[in-house]
Image (cartoon, rainbow, N blue to C red):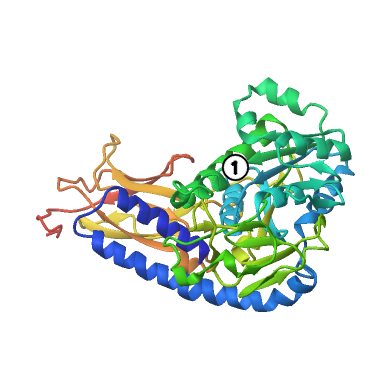
Amino acid sequence: MDSLYRYFHIHFGNTLKAPNEILEDSLKKCADKIENLYHEWYLKKITGTWTNAIVGDLEKLGYISEINKQRDFYKHYVSAKKSKNTRTFVIISDALRYEVAVELAEILGYTTKGKATLESMQAIFPGITKFGMAALLPGKDLTVNDKMAVFLNEKPTDSTIRRNSVLTATDENSIAVQYKDLLQMKKQERRDLISGKGIIYIYHNTIDTLGDKLPTETKVFDACKTAIDELTGLVKLILNDLSGIHIYIIADHGFLYTYKPLAESQKISKQTFKGEVYELGRRYALVSPETTAEYLLPINTGREIGGIPIKGYAPQDTVRIKVQGGGENYVHGGISLQEMVVPVIVYKGMRSDYKKYVEVQNPGLSLISDSRKVSNLMFSLDFLQKQPIGEKVQPCSYTLHFTDDSDLPISDTQTVIANRTVANAQERVFRVKFTLKQMAYNPNKIYRFVMTNNIDVPEEVEFHIDIAFADDFGFGF
């Protein structure tokens, strides 16, 4: 549902850039219906059910029991690879929501020579950048001071340079770098940067940088598509240029986004807090242990966050807390699934000589109609998509047409998009209608059916065309 909502608004946004006089109002009515379905039905139902399931753990523990925690990422994933003396790349994409990572993992699976497995962890509360970024670093003690600055083993974590210091304190053969800086380097500069390094953290920020600002928050779904393209390119760069094989792609937090702002009745005033408030966001609050708040869920942060004693609060449903500045459509920091579920893409690159290597391939399309004789200007042929689309079988577009013996086209050109995922072969059959040009055909001459996909060698099948005479409607006499 989150993905479909995102796809809809990407395309709906495109129509707003070039309004159609006839369709404009109808499309906007459609958008209103989609908004009501997504916000008032889907988000309310799933968030309410999820909150009821976790509220006890959050109040008692500050996290959800029996679900892997973001704080354990380094120990669970990175340390395990480090012991095997392999170079590990960790890409942290700010606000890469789980459903966006699903799409990214699929694309990596069929566009690269490797395997992408999607896993997940729960984000630390509150799910905001400074806590999420610190949680992904090695270190036992995550603490805050009275300014709500975040430290790990008493080291600050609020910049790439400082996170690099935390990494190297655990393993001196580590390095942290910004995605944009890496991209601007020449090949040799990149290779020199990681020479002798076993752990490379790469920080990527495309989604959050737009979503967190009022003037650009409505472009957050476009930013998701950009992030997928950038991360796909980054993985290919690591594979091809930096000889990387083990890559993790993870996020610091997710996000909630609704196209229309919430009504005032769905916002909570900060006046609801009775006591000292240290930090306030639209989806979270960090307060003194004695502070109370109506209509908000209390969260015990003591087990996860040390330093100055604090208590957390989170709104229920999709409710926002009223704060100054920023936008209110794009939010994060709360306890909804969209905010808390952190994707972990475990990617392993493979070379062609690896035992488990599987080359990315097209599904294949074959002509299954028996007859090789055409007796009408208009006719249909059946085609079978040979394999269902899967992890290593990518969708492919095939163009089909007929030519004479001089390779000149004698029919219209049709397109078959082979993208069906079903295992049943009968459900992967395409019936395609062709129309030949009105001209004289020699029944003794060989004509060719041509099928191409701009990747594989074109396939040709010989046909005979026996039409004594054709009228304007394509009937032979």
Residue 352's place in the image compared with 422, above or below, is: above
Can I make out residue 137 in this image? no
The image shows residue 395 at horizontal and vertical percentages of 49, 52
Which residue is labeled 1 in the image?
A: 205
Residue at screen point 86% across, 49% down: 80
Determine whether, in the image, residue 344 is placed left or right of residue 447.
Answer: right
Residue 189's place in the image compared with 107, above or below, is: above
Dividing the picture into quarters, in which one does residue 344 lie?
bottom right
Dividing the picture into quarters, in which one does residue 368 lie?
bottom left
**Between 224 and 59, which is closer to the camera in this rendering?**
59
Query: Mark 1 falls on what kind of element?
Result: loop
Residue at screen point 74% across, 48% down: 356
Residue at screen point 74% across, 26% down: 193
Residue 439's place in the image compared with 244, above or below, is: below
Determine whether, in the image, residue 153 is placed left or right of residue 440.
Answer: right
Amino acid type of the residue tagged 1 in the rendering: Asn
**Between 193 and 151, which is closer to the camera in this rendering?**
151
**Between 460 and 283, which is closer to the camera in this rendering?**
283
The image shows residue 119 at horizontal and vertical percentages of 70, 59
Determine whether, in the image, residue 9 is placed left or right of residue 72.
Answer: left
Residue at screen point 52% across, 50% down: 211
